[in-house]
Amino acid sequence: MKARYSIFSLARNALSSHENWPQAWRSPEPKKEYDVVIVGGGGHGLVTAYYLAKEHGITNVAVIEKGWLGGGNTGRNTTIVRSNYMWDESAALYEHSLKLWENMTKELNFNVMFSQRGVLNLAHTLNEVRITKRRIHANRLNGIDSEWVEPEQVKEWVPIIDLRGNGRYPVLGGSLQRRGGTARHDAVAWGYARAADALGVDIIQQCAVEGFDIEDGRVTGVRTSKGAIKAKKVGVVVAGHAGVLANMAGFKLPINSRPLQALVSEPVKPCVHCVVMAGAVHAYISQSDKGELVIGAGTDAYNSYAQWGSNPVTEDTLAAICELYPLFRRMRMMRQWGGVVDTCPDASPIISTTPVKGLYFNCGWGTGGFKATPGSGHIFADTVANDRPHPIAEPFSLERFKTGFLIDEHAAAGVAH
Ligand SMILES: Cc1cc2nc3c(=O)[nH]c(=O)nc-3n(C[C@H](O)[C@H](O)[C@H](O)COP(=O)(O)OP(=O)(O)OC[C@H]3O[C@@H](n4cnc5c(N)ncnc54)[C@H](O)[C@@H]3O)c2cc1C
């Protein structure tokens, strides 16, 4: 058992100037063989390992990460959490996840700073008003909290907004999910890593998977920069690199890998109290606990593995932000960065068995998988443990690209994250 974090352990460690905290997780050398190897030490991979150990009793597990934990999209996203997706299949998936968010800090004994401050999606055109209202009805039929807000109510939630949107982007109303919000992304990775390690999972960083060993159509292990590791089953959760890993295993995925960028401003006093998203103008905003404005943009229009975004996208986003919030015209931006997101043609993820026996893929979360982290890992662990899709995962299998039963979430997930 790990030492529990509490007010008492904080006080005890203060006495030794906080120099004797135990390591949050071990850094073991890889064993020769595991029951399950998870490739990718982002949030989704770590949650998968945690639930394999916790709910399925499979503790001989390694998480193999080529860089550092959470150094991929988990540590690069703008942390918006919500579940107001359109279709029944997505509603089940994202609501399952949101429920796990609501208990995460307690379950992990690690403060992930989950703040249910509300997520507001603005509508700027009549068409958007219709689509948004339709989605609200669909959400409510699925038991998800979702409500229409008139422009005056938008102004109450976000007093600094200019409802005229400088003439270009008038605010005609929006949808509000009060249970939505933000969280601390690094804490999510660290919290699950610590909890998984406590259950016996080996977390191996700075170790890239370079190939798979496949015999008679079944995976038997992975080849890594630290040597070959045998595995009865392998789960791959590498976001923007899913296509690369699928190529290594000898099949193709219907995925595009594109840069998605975000930026933060200098810190200012609290002025944005919820998350505000505007799909039509490709810009969304929230304020971090440090006071920085966290601003997200759209994806670049081309495929790339570069972890930065192009300048025209930044310029468009900032222009829209200044038009909606004239107050921010004088603010300075501090940092900009990008991540490589894996987008599917229907803007829905893939959680699936594959043509190779014992090899499973969880990917295609595109611009919006942070919110799904706990739910995705939970159902992927079940899929890997039982060698068949979890009922929530079933519609998200690779089969849908053959059958045509796509789950088109472009309106709910295209730009909005
Ligand atoms: C700028 C930006 C903003 C975003 N905003 C939001 C948001 O507000 N809300 C939201 O819900 N989602 C958002 N997302 C999307 C979200 O970040 C991702 O969908 C989610 O974090 C994916 O998590 P993951 O664990 O699957 O991937 P990652 O965190 O990327 O983890 C995959 C890991 O696999 C590792 N890896 C890759 N190849 C190999 C290999 N060969 N061997 C070993 N390891 C390997 C990588 O190093 C990486 O650490 C955003 C993304 C970006 C880039």
Image: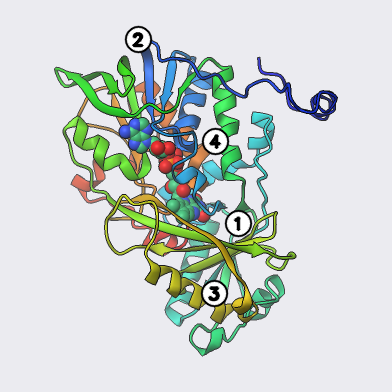
In front: label 2 or label 1: 2
**Position of residue 292 measured from the top left corner of the image (x, y, whole percent):** 64, 60
Give the number of the mark in front: 3 or 1: 3
Give the residue displayed 56% in from the left and 17% down from the top: 199
Whichever of callouts 3 and 1 sits on the residue coming sooner in the sequence is 1
**Three-letter amino acid code of the residue under disc 2:** Lys
Q: Is residue 372 above or below residue 124?
A: above
Mark 4 CB near ligand 1 (8 Å cut):
yes
Mark earlier in primary sequence (3, 2): 2
Please report whichever mark, 1 or 4, sits nearer to the chain's N-terminal start.
1
- Tell me the residue that label 3 is attached to: 321
Q: Are there few (<14), some (14-19), or many (20+) residues within 10 Å of tag 1?
A: some
Residue denoted by label 2: 32
Can residue 392 be seen here? The reply is: no
Label 1 sits on residue: 145
Whether tag 3 and tag 1 are in contact, CB under 8 A, the answer is: no
Residue drawn at (46%, 81%) of the image: 125
